Structure formats: structure tokens, C-alpha cells
Image (tube, rainbow, N blue to C red):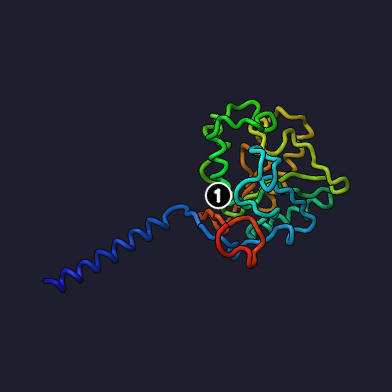
Amino acid sequence: MGGRFLHNTGWILSLLGTVLLLAGSAGPTDVPEMAMPAGFVDAASVVPGLVVEMRYHGRNNFVGRPIAGYDQHLCLLTAEAAAALVRTQARLRPLGLGLKVFDCYRPMRAVRDFVRWARDLGDQGRKTQHYPGVDKSELFARGYIAERSGHARGSTVDLTLIDLASRRELGMGTPYDWFDPIAWPSSLAVPAPARAHRLLLQLAMTDAGFRPYEQEWWHFTLERERFADRYFDFPVRQPGPQTKGGN
């Protein structure tokens, strides 16, 4: 009797473990690594002439301060996303144009930082610069802030076009991170040159394998993501001895 009970118990535990394993793998998962895993690269070292201006590493962003997890001024992406940007850059260069990135891989700790900020309705310091036409209490409902971000998968990038000769950004009708329908790529409320620049950016990116986001002219995700269901949380910093241990 005891042996049979132990045998059955072992079978039940084994089955339970299998169910839990399947449940855990059925949907997107957060991955809490502290060090950059294999498959990620420093995009600036791969994409010739890429201009990097990581807004969340500094204060020039909708929160108005450095964001959690952006330890260094780096654009980290999956190797596949960086390779696609190489193709985009090559198509733009004959036109005298290039790419400037504002955000690349975004750790989940940064996403949580955005969520905390959005829930603090008393902090309206950057409203004029980023969301003058939207009540801060509506940022979640309108999709400007969310509990998860595709950036945490490593194959999403926010960027714009620059003139290679002057290094100046081309006019896109709104600044980066402008929370308003006028920032939608399809908006007709911006001047014709801005619409043309948005279309050119979209064509160059989609031709290289990215898909656009309907509410942000600057936001693109690689169609064939390496980590389509994984959300990483390692900080933005160069791999090396300093990545070991806590943050």
C-alpha cells in the first residue's frame, strides 16, 4: 500500500511539474538576467554611421530624468535587428540621408519606471513638451504607456532620419515621443514635407524587414524577432565584469 502510494505520488508530482512547465511557456515571459545575453549587440559598432541619442539615458524625455536601467549611452539590439538597420542605412546613404536612434532595447525595469511615472498625476513637468493635448490620466487608456513594451524583446527601435551633410534631423511634423494623433504616420495634419519624410522612413525600414507602428512615426519592430515572447530586464550597459552582481 505504501509503495503504491509513493508510486502514485511521484506520478502526480511529475504530471504537475509538466503542467506548470507548459503553463509557464505558453505566453510571454520576463527574463531577469543581469548581463546582456547572447544574441544582442551594440548597434553602433555594427551599423556604419549610426547616430545614437538615447533619450532615456538623460533628461531630454517625457519623464524629464534618466530612466531606470539605462546605465550607459548605448543602443543595444538583437543581431538581426542591427543587421536590418545596416540594410536601411545602405539604402539611405545614396540619398544623403542616415539614421538617428532615440531608443533601442528597453529593460523591463524602465517600463516599470514609466508606469510609476504615469500613475503619479502630480508630476506634469514635461506636459508642454510631450503631451499638451492629452490628460495624463488617459495615457494608459490611449496606449501611450503600457505594462509591457516590445522594446524589451530587443528588436524594436525608435529612430528618425538625418541629413548626412548637416547631421540635422529631417522635419517629421512632431518631436519624438509626442503623445498625440498628429504623430501617427498616417496623420494629414502635418505639412507635406513632413509626410514625405515619414513615408520615406517607413519605406526604408519596411524594405529592410521592419513593421511600423500605427500610432508613432518613429517606432519600428523587426518582423522576424529572435525573442518574440521574451521580455528582458538586463540593464543597458556594455558586457563585461561590471555586469556581474546586482544593479
**Neighbour tally class for label 1: few under 14, some 14-19, many 20 plus, Cα within 10 Å:** some
Instruction: From the viewer's side, name the closer residue of 150 and 202.
Output: 150
Residue 235 placement, left or right of 27: right
Q: Which residue is mark 1?
A: 109
Looking at the picture, how far across and down is residue 218, in whole percent?
68, 42
Please state which amino acid type lies under the numbered disc 1.
Arg
Looking at the picture, how far across and down is residue 133, in whole percent?
64, 25
Tell me if residue 186 can be seen.
no
Q: Which quadrant, please, contains the N terminus?
A: bottom left
Q: Quadrant of residue 215?
A: top right
Residue depicted at 82% across the width and 48% down the height:
97
- Farthest residue toward the front? 246
> Which SS class for mark 1?
helix
Looking at the picture, how far across and down is residue 173, in whole percent?
74, 33
Check the image and report above or below for 184 versus 31.
above
Instruction: From the viewer's side, name the closer residue of 206 and 15.
Output: 15
- Counting the numbered discs, the total is 1
